[in-house]
């Protein structure tokens, strides 16, 4: 999300340097655009690729197929031989390296090695040459957790071989943001003997069928004045869509979005990113000013969408096109179809309009989402939300030694664990631009602030206080399993 203008060229350059071409689009992934980093070395601790032979189906005793899974390691701060190992989980995007966020600071502090495994199917870690619905059947959080467990064991054994040791165990700690934050919490839940603890930054552990709290939070984060303007724009757009569909879509540069629901999701997401990634003023200031000046609000919003969301931020409009989502070609830089498959089978997070006082159009409803799942993936694809929550526990997760953190303005925080329970502390960082992954990313959350710099957060002390708590928990839990690398059960 970022600044409006130093000059348009300079800001665009800053964004392109900080962000890569990854975007999910509607039912915007919690992680969307957080990983959009370039190959610029300043933004990564390392981009050197390594490869690991991973099992395709961890649940079958008969299927022994494997695929190549990409990973990274950063050993500059590692206190050989007994330092801790930080496992950073890559989520629903191409994993192009280990980003230089606050984890780099923590690695220095604890003398830790950092390793990061790319999520199956994403980036260069696809088991197949085509992403047909049939081929996607091994894409799930459950398989991904086993990937992490098998990789963790293999990496530890590889380290021992290099040191000519047998059975040695470093102390491991797992980190993740957003969906990978949920994976971090779930890994500690399912494999407590393999990690001393976990950090679930904006960890969306609760699968939600109709996620109306998402839109409600956007309204709260916007504040009364900006919220009212956004609602007025939605009314005007809905009205214009009835009478002037083609010209309206052209006005937003989105004529290719033939399905009205796709177009309306595009417009809704354009507003969401301002709050999700710590740039609320980029959206609200020009719209409120346009309202006060009596200007055309739809035109003002179209300018924001084209200049900022598409132009500066670099979102591709085709991301919202269901015909694009049907494309089964394997594309390292495009994960839209993959995340939608997980949405349509496991977690839903259907960002439907609330029945009252919504920001987004009421046409973004449950039927729209279910129709999309059917249209893109075929009959029989349906999100098993209840099963996901039964398996992991949702916000009643029965884990231990997991830190949950969330930003106050982030619409995804209502799918996270926001209250503390024994051995699972939860912290909410409250500030004007504290959004998704603030504890690890600083402010704004996108583009990347090197080492998670919090100076541009409206309340840096709020971020630093939570970081200090994180350090205390990590220090304690590492010390409790030091020498074994395993937590007591």
Image (tube, rainbow, N blue to C red):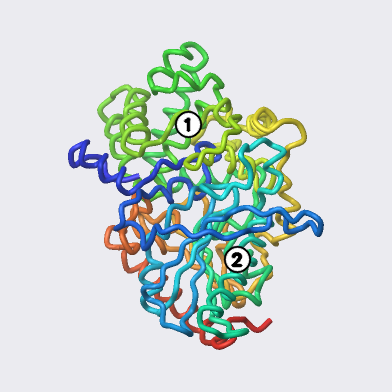
Is residue 272 visible to the viewer in this orientation of the structure?
yes
Q: In the picture provided, is 189 more to the left or to the right than 283? A: right
Dot 2: few (<14), some (14–19), or many (≥20) neighbours within 10 Å? some
Residue 479 against residue 261 in the figure, above or below: below
- Residue 266 is tagged as 1
Q: Quadrant of residue 128?
A: top right
- Residue 188 is tagged as none
Q: Mark 2 and mark 1 in contact (Cβ < 8 Å)?
A: no
Farthest residue toward the right? 62
Residue 250 x/y as whole percent = 40, 17
Which element type, helix, strand or loop, lies under badge 2?
A: helix
Identify the residue at horizontal 45%, vertical 32% (top origin).
231
Residue 50 x/y as whole percent = 49, 60
Q: Nearer the viewer, residue 122 or 428?
A: 122
Which element type, helix, strand or loop, lies under badge 1?
A: helix
Identify the residue at horizontal 65%, vertical 51% (top origin).
207
Residue 477 x/y as whole percent = 54, 82
Identify the residue at horizontal 37%, vertical 35% (top origin).
309
Is residue 223 visible to the viewer in this orientation of the structure?
no
Which badge, 1 or 2, comes first in the chain's sequence?
Answer: 2
Residue 443 against residue 78 in the figure, above or below: above
Dot 1: few (<14), some (14–19), or many (≥20) neighbours within 10 Å? many
Q: Quadrant of the C terminus?
A: bottom right
Q: What residue did someone put label 2 on?
A: 151
Residue 155 against residue 446 in the figure, above or below: below
Q: Nearer the viewer, residue 147 or 361?
A: 147
Distance between the alpha carbons at the discs numbered 1 and 2: 37 Å
Point out the frontmost of discs 1 and 2: 2
């Amino acid at each position: 999300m970022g600044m409006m203008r130093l000059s348009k060229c300079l800001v665009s350059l800053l964004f392109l340097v900080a962000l890569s071409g990854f975007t999910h689009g509607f039912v915007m992934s919690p992680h969307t655009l957080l990983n959009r980093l370039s190959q610029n070395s300043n933004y990564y601790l390392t981009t050197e690729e390594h490869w690991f032979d991973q099992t395709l189906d961890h649940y079958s005793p008969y299927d022994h197929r494997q695929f190549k899974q990409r990973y990274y390691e950063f050993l500059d701060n590692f206190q050989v031989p007994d330092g801790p190992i930080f496992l950073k989980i890559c989520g629903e995007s191409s994993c192009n390296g280990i980003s230089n966020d606050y984890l780099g600071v923590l690695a220095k502090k604890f003398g830790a090695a950092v390793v990061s495994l790319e999520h199956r199917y994403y980036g260069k870690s696809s088991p197949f040459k085509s992403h047909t619905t049939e081929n996607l059947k091994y894409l799930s959080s459950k398989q991904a957790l086993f990937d992490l467990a098998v990789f963790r064991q293999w990496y530890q054994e590889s380290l021992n071989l290099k040191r000519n040791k047998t059975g040695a165990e470093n102390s491991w700690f797992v980190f993740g943001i957003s969906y990978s934050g949920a994976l971090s919490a779930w890994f500690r839940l399912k494999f407590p003997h393999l990690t001393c603890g976990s950090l679930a930054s904006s960890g969306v552990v609760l699968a939600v069928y109709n996620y109306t709290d998402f839109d409600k939070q956007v309204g709260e984060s916007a504040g009364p004045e900006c919220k009212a303007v956004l609602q007025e724009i939605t009314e005007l757009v809905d009205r214009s869509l009835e009478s002037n569909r083609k010209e309206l879509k052209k006005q937003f540069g989105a004529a290719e979005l033939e399905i009205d629901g796709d177009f309306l999701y595009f417009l809704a997401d354009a507003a969401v990113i301002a709050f999700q990634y710590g740039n609320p003023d980029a959206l609200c200031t020009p719209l409120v000013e346009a309202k006060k000046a009596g200007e055309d609000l739809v035109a003002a919003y179209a300018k924001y969408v084209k200049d900022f969301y598409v132009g500066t931020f670099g979102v591709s409009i085709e991301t919202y096109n269901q015909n694009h989502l049907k494309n089964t070609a394997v594309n390292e830089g495009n994960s839209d179809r993959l995340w939608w498959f997980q949405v349509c089978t496991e977690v839903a997070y259907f960002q439907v309009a609330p029945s009252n006082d919504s920001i987004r159009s009421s046409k973004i409803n449950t039927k729209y989402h279910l129709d999309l799942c059917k249209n893109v993936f075929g009959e029989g694809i349906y999100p098993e939300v209840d099963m996901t929550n039964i398996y992991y526990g949702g916000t009643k997760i029965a884990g231990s030694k997991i830190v949950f953190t969330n930003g106050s303005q982030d619409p995804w925080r209502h799918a996270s664990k926001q209250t503390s329970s024994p051995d699972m502390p939860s912290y909410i960082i409250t500030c004007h631009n504290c959004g998704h992954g603030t504890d690890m990313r600083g402010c704004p959350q996108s583009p990347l602030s090197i080492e998670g710099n919090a100076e541009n957060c409206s309340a840096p002390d709020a971020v630093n206080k939570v970081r200090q708590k994180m350090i205390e928990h990590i220090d304690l839990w590492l010390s409790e399993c030091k020498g074994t690398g395993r937590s007591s059960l």
